[in-house]
Image (cartoon, rainbow, N blue to C red):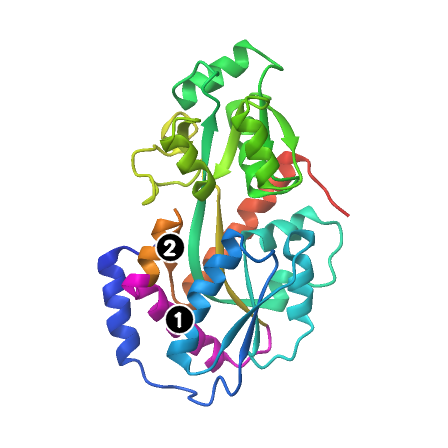
Amino acid sequence: MKLSIAAPAVAAALLNVALTAQPAQAAYPERPVTVVVGYSAGGATDVIARLVSQKLAVQMGQPFIVENRPGANGNIATEYVANAKKDGHTILFGGSNNVTNSSLYKKLPFDFKNDFVPVGMVSLLPNILVVHPSVPVASVSELVQYAKDNPGKLNFATSGVGSSQHLSGSLFNTMAGIDITHIPYKGSAPAVSDFLGGHVEVMFDNAPSALPNVKAGKSRALGVTSATRSQAAPEIPPISESGLEGYDISAWLGYFVTSGVDSTIAERLNTEIGKALADPEVRAKLLSMSTEPMTGDLEQIRDFVNAEEEKWSKAVQASGAQLD
């Protein structure tokens, strides 16, 4: 079964289903639910978590309180939730960073695949392959040829080792047979700053950050890292359509509970998250942030996460990245 990007018609159907669903396990939640985010307040992950969690609070009659526990690419937050009481009142807002960490870190104090259960996808965040205007290329194929003709000349900036930006670039290098040098920064802000200043020529920047600079003429978009065109930027072709067939790598976000949480709670959360994402106002806000709402039942999202873990594992292996 395949997880889907929620189109407006699908969202409307999901809303109707959610509204007619039986009020199973009405006792849950019995008290406020803590939603743990592995990144600082104000970032894209935090903003999206708060947007959807506020809607869940209205729907489910209890506060959904976002708690930020940043550090170690989300591992600090994940460990905290792994050790919490398994009653569904402490849940993780995580995503692709978690499946990446399973391969990136030599040792973790938890087993993400076995210790957590996905209960609702929220959004897909593709990266955009952009080049500085000084680079004389206008397409992915031209960039690949330019890199082959000018070995060692191009560099790509990222927010750090093991980030979706880094792995997007590493996979691109591997599939294209080129070697654009990776320049890791301590966060997206300094990476973007140096890129816009022309100190680094290439980025696989996340869509919310990249698109405003593209529209302002400060950078040139060549392709999107997702397998299909992004609703946020339908005019940008997928990299997979530009000579790198099969290229597909995007960050994503969703809710997870710990293994051992009653299955009826997981089902209730899945239904309510689907209902929240079907709300026109929530959808509009997500799309305005250049992120695409995602939907799926429990089986679909489990299969999706398993497939993503395999995909990101290969990307980490190709990058050669390893962290303690």
Kindly indicate the quadrant of the structure image that contains residue 190.
top right
Per the image, is 273 magenta? Answer: yes
Residue 296 among magenta residues: no
Q: Residue at x 31, y 45 (%)?
A: 231
Q: Say which residue appears at 60% left-offset and 14% top-offset.
A: 153
- According to the picture, the residue beneath numbered tag 2 turns out to be 286
Majority secondary structure of magenta residues: helix
How far apart marks 2 and 1 lie (CA) works out to 13 Å
- Determine whether the residue tagged by mark 1 lies in a helix, strand or loop: helix
Q: Earlier in the sequence, mark 2 or mark 1?
A: 1
Question: Residue 239, can we see it?
Answer: no
The residue tagged 1 is 55
Counting from the top left corner in percent of width and height, residue 239 is at 41, 31
Q: Name the secondary structure under disc 2.
A: helix
Q: Position of residue 212 (x, y in %)?
A: 40, 37
Write down the region rendered in magenta: 259-281
| Residue 105 point in image, percent of width and height | 71, 49
Asked if 206 appears above or below 50 in the picture, the reply is above
Which residue is found at the position 29% from the left and 34% from the top?
Answer: 235
Vertical side of 236 occupied by 164: above or below: below
